[in-house]
Amino acid sequence: MHIDARTLDHNATLKADIAIVGAGIAGITLAIELMDSGLSVLLIECGSYETPDAMAEDVARWQEVGIRDVEPHLCNRRVGGSGWLWGGHCRPLDPIDFEKRDWVPHSGWPIRYEDMLPHFDRALDICDLRTVPGASVVWDARQTDAQGLYPWDQVQYPLNRMGAVDFYQHALTLRLCGRVRVLTCATLSDVRLTHDLRGVDHLVCKVGETKTIRVEAQRFVLAAGGVENPSILLRADSQHECGIGNQHDLVGRFLQAHPTVDCPFLMLNDPKLPPAMVLDWSRISVTDIYRRREALRDYAFAKIGLSPQVQREHKLLNAAGLLSSFNRTDPTACWREFQQFVASRGEGLLEDDAHQKLSAFFGRTDELLRAMHMLRGGNPREDCYFILRFAAEQSPDPESRVGLLEELDALGNRRPALDWRINELDRDSIKRTCEILGQPFEAHGLAEDRLAEPVMDPSWPRVLHGGFHYIGTTRMASDPTQGVVDTDCRVFGVRNLYVAGCSVFPTCGHAPPTFTMVALAARLARHLAPAGQGQIAEPKAAAPVGA
């Protein structure tokens, strides 16, 4: 059921069992999972079902006071949220991402990777990832040299998937559900606590510049994104001077992203090696790719990264890269060729032996490149060069944070300020990962190793692409002195206030956050409506996810 807040009277009151703030990927997932629970759900969105208007765009703006991202303010204030900008790239976090690592300060989740497996399994269905289409194999796999450029224990080949799910369509489904109401054009302006200050009494939402409405519920969930979730808690300072959940000054801290680095150039010395791997980055930008989900959907692809063993040995952060060519003329076809090949070698994110299969694939890279290029009518002696574009894990740093400016937006709310920082551990880890991954290419005479050049520059980074991911700003912990929410994603000290989304991640790994975020939202739904209440079934056990 859809309610346009602009049609309501000033000071109107809406009531529900559960109120969710934010109709993006996390909020929609939570509402979908609660749809048949028997509970009444109110999903609150500041935008509408249509393209954001000028006011919604103004409310969405923040100011960057730290490292400048190459694409600032990438958010979408309407139903569907970041789902409109998401390219469908899916992979769960790795087991090592959940571990306490002595070389990574503030690392370690209070829940285990194994605890997430049944929820990862549920996320496969929500994201429509249960199967990966097959495709033709470009050479006889039985002749593959499984050793390849790297020893098996040195690298990993994370299998990734481009999802076909459209969260906006999920949101349209909610309009037909009587137990879920979608309230649009209502912007949260205050969270009012009970008299004992230990629970949320109601929310105050603004509708335009003159109208307010009141939302009452038994439980409340903030699912407004990695910037807005902490901003909401910090703005709610009328009863707590420092904001809600901020008694230890942790709200908004530990801001992480995925520093995305182009490490040029793998200059291929062997003229037999054609350009082929994945994408012509010189012809298409990242944001263009995100808007071409229909062209890229249903494909799997492999990245290359260092194994957990090597990460521990060298005390490195997690990272994974994608080899990309600069001189292809048809980026979509080039992308598809590689995706189809990998899809033909593995059955999906739950493939147990995907590491061995993908290791075998990289073992005959030259033959793959040559075969793929010849299939497209290319000249096998064409000169070419590659970059390794990879997304790196960032260490949790309390000085990297979201705060508030004195400047007000169009609705009178203080505007967020992002002080995103890269520390020496982040920089050194990227540099050494590049060096380790580049050594075999040079040793085999395939390339001139220049992978670490970008991070050798003392001024790096002046401008950096962070993957459009804002992670860790309301981090999960077992102790309120270490985080903002507990293992149930409940705000410490507030009995009925929860947070959903990647802002609760203690660490970010290298994988895009969407898949793990969906899994955590499904997990939260089971907490809010446990088995036996309504129709939500207990999640089944699952095999390990990913390769």
Image (cartoon, grey):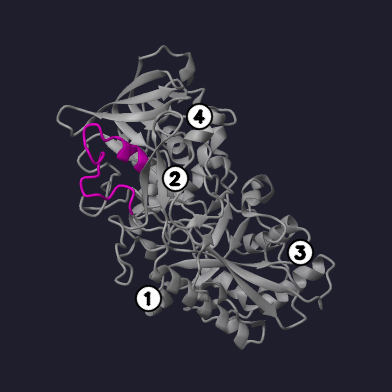
Classify mark 1: helix, strand or loop. loop
Q: Name the residue under label 4.
A: 47
Q: Is residue 234 above or below residue 450?
A: above
Query: Which of disc 1 and disc 4 is earlier in sequence?
Result: 4
Q: Is residue 431 above or below residue 179?
A: below
Q: Mark 2 points at which residue?
A: 518
Q: Work out how far the residue at label 4 is from the one at label 2, CA to CA, in angstroms.
A: 21 Å
Residue 160 on the magenta span: no
Identify which amino acid the numbered label 2 is placed on.
Val
Q: Work out how far the residue at label 4 is from the one at label 1, CA to CA, in angstroms.
A: 44 Å
Q: Work out how far the residue at label 3 is from the one at label 1, CA to CA, in angstroms.
A: 36 Å
Q: Residues within 10 Å of mark 3 (few under 14, many from 20)?
A: many
Query: Which of disc 2 and disc 4 is earlier in sequence?
Result: 4
Q: Work out how far the residue at label 2 is from the one at label 3, CA to CA, in angstroms.
A: 35 Å
Residue 295's tag is none
Q: In this view, does 397 lie above or below 42?
A: below
Q: Residue 534: in sight, yes or no?
A: no
Rendering coords of residue 446 (x, y %) = 67, 83
Identify which amino acid the numbered label 4 is placed on.
Gly
Residue 110 quadrant: bottom left
Q: Name the residue under label 1.
A: 315
Query: Which of disc 3 and disc 2 is earlier in sequence?
Result: 3
Q: Is residue 25 above or below residue 401?
A: above
Q: Main secondary structure of the magenta part?
A: loop
Residue 53 in the figure: left or right of residue 378: left
